[in-house]
Image (cartoon, grey):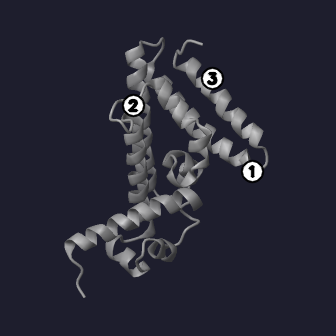
Amino acid sequence: MKVSKEKAAQNRAALVETAARLFREHGIDGVGVAEIGKAAGLTHGALYAHFPSKEALAAEALAHGLQIGHERMTRTPDGRAPSLSELLDSYLSEEKRDDIANGCAMAASASEVGRQDETISARYSEGFELMAAVFEKHLRAQKVKGDPREKAIAISSTLIGAIAASRAVLKAQPELANDILRAVRRAVGDIAGEKA
């Protein structure tokens, strides 16, 4: 039975959204195509009708997650652009750290992407450039001392690493996990030229 173009597009979107969530939760290598298909309400055969490989799906799912993250960084729910301070507070919050399924795709996949193919690395690189560009724009507007792009790259890398490290120690040492978020928030504020 032939599926309509509209239904095919819905199925593809369901696969991408489901894969993005599952990859954040379990890692790219921690989820199989059958599991993704089932969670999306489809067969793994349907997955291969849309994507030639799991890697192709992973690249699109990562790009999808990174786009959502970029939208969150550039627009608040009420439609305005968040301030630099709001961005930092939100990204380094316990709530965002604890919500792996809906959290930052960059932090969720940072260590894993290096073991994936070039297509996935390219999507991650594009997402990183977008993230750094958001911070660079804020730093230029604030006329911070030093190179705004270099500082934006440092801030982006630090935030991603902070979430990853905080998640890594959370089960064993919740207090340390929270200390990481607080310490990095202060340090990044210093890099960004925030007044104490």
Marks 2 and 3: CB-CB under 8 Å? no
Q: Earlier in the sequence, mark 3 or mark 1?
A: 1
Amino acid bearing label 1: Lys
CA distance for labels 3 and 1: 23 Å
Which residue is situated farthest in the front direction here? 78
Give neighbour class at mark 3: few <14, some 14-19, many 20+ (Cα, 10 Å). some
CA distance for labels 1 and 2: 33 Å
Q: Quadrant of the C terminus?
A: top right
Residue pointed to by mark 2: 133
Q: Quadrant of the N terminus?
A: bottom left
Residue pointed to by mark 3: 186
Location of residue 46 in the rendering, given as x and y in whole percent from the top left corner: 36, 78
Q: Is residue 72 above or below residue 145?
A: below
Q: Earlier in the sequence, mark 2 or mark 3?
A: 2
Name the mark nearer the viewer: 1 or 2: 1
Residue 56 seen: no
Residue 28 seen: yes
Which residue shows up at 27% across the image and 72% down it? 8
Marks 1 and 2: CB-CB under 8 Å? no
Give neighbour class at mark 1: few <14, some 14-19, many 20+ (Cα, 10 Å). few
* Helix, strand or loop status at disc 1: loop
Q: Nearer the viewer, residue 21 or 78?
A: 78
Give neighbour class at mark 2: few <14, some 14-19, many 20+ (Cα, 10 Å). some
Marks 3 and 1: CB-CB under 8 Å? no
* Helix, strand or loop status at disc 2: helix
Location of residue 40 in the rendering, given as x and y in whole percent from the top left corner: 43, 71
Amino acid bearing label 2: Ala
CA distance for labels 2 and 3: 21 Å
Q: Earlier in the sequence, mark 1 or mark 2?
A: 2
Location of residue 51 in the rendering, given as x and y in whole percent from the top left corner: 35, 70
Residue pointed to by mark 1: 171
Q: Is residue 179 above or below residue 113?
A: above
